[in-house]
Amino acid sequence: MKKYGEKYKNPGNAFVINFDVGKHKIYPLVVLIILIILSFFKISEVEFDKNMMNIEAKGLESIRLNQKILDEFEFSPDNTIFISDNLVEAKGLYNKLKSLNIFSEVDSIIAYIPETEFQIERLKNANEMKNLKFRKSEFDLKKLKSEINKINFSLSKAALSLSLIGKRN
């Protein structure tokens, strides 16, 4: 019998496994092979439940509320993702999906990219701005710091006044 130390109670014979794997190597190997063979027969019966609501605990209020939202607003909990490598194809797909009534929401980067004509016009304007010559103006850094400090002091004073007013109530 093994000694477990002063802290631990003797577990008794129920927890002691007196099996020397070194002497009997064939038995664990046979059991392993049998389990692997049985798993090949059962693997076809394995299914994955794609509905997360079936996996959740039954009777939770959050699940009931989620189902109520799905029923009331006619939403589907399923998401669909389309990926395109071509901007023209992505625009066409986005416009087709927007026109269908089966999707509650369609989101794409296409909605944020301006039309090609606007992009060309903006690039021309940017190049014009880049090539403009600006005259140097006199810039007084000390005066700017002084103004910023005055504004900071005024904001701090206003915040302190507001906090004191709030404490009286």
Image (tube, grey):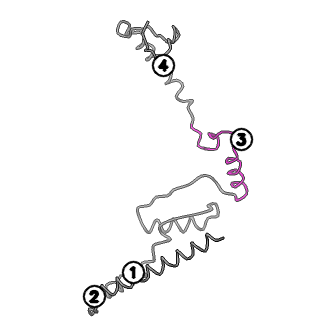
Q: Secondary structure at mark 1?
A: helix
The quarter of the picture where the C terminus appears is bottom right
Indicate which label's residue lies in the foreground, 4 or 2: 2
Marks 1 and 3, how far apart at CA? 60 Å
Amino acid on which disc 3 is placed: Gly
Marks 2 and 1, how far apart at CA? 35 Å
Residue underneath mark 4:
35
Give the residue displayed 57% in from the left and 54% down from the top: 79
Residue underneath mark 2:
131
Indicate which label's residue lies in the foreground, 2 or 3: 3
Indicate which label's residue lies in the foreground, 1 or 4: 1
Amino acid on which disc 2 is placed: Asn
Q: Secondary structure at mark 2?
A: helix
Give the percent coordinates (x, y) of residue 134: 28, 91
Marks 4 and 2, how far apart at CA? 76 Å
Q: Where 84 sits versus 154, above or below?
A: above
Work out whether mark 1 precedes mark 3 in sequence or the reverse, and give the earlier one: 3
Marks 1 and 4, how far apart at CA? 77 Å
- Number of marks in the image? 4
Residue underneath mark 3:
59
Where residue 149 is drawn, which disc sits there? Answer: 1
Q: Quadrant of residue 116?
A: bottom left
Q: Which residues are magenta?
A: 48-73
Give the percent coordinates (x, y) of residue 164: 58, 73
Number of other residues with Cα within 10 Å of mark 1, as a class: few under 14, some 14 to 19, many 20 or more: few
Work out whether mark 2 precedes mark 1 in sequence or the reverse, and give the earlier one: 2
Marks 2 and 3, how far apart at CA? 68 Å
Give the residue displayed 44% in from the left and 17% down from the top: 32
Q: Secondary structure at mark 4?
A: helix
Give the percent coordinates (x, y) of residue 131: 27, 88
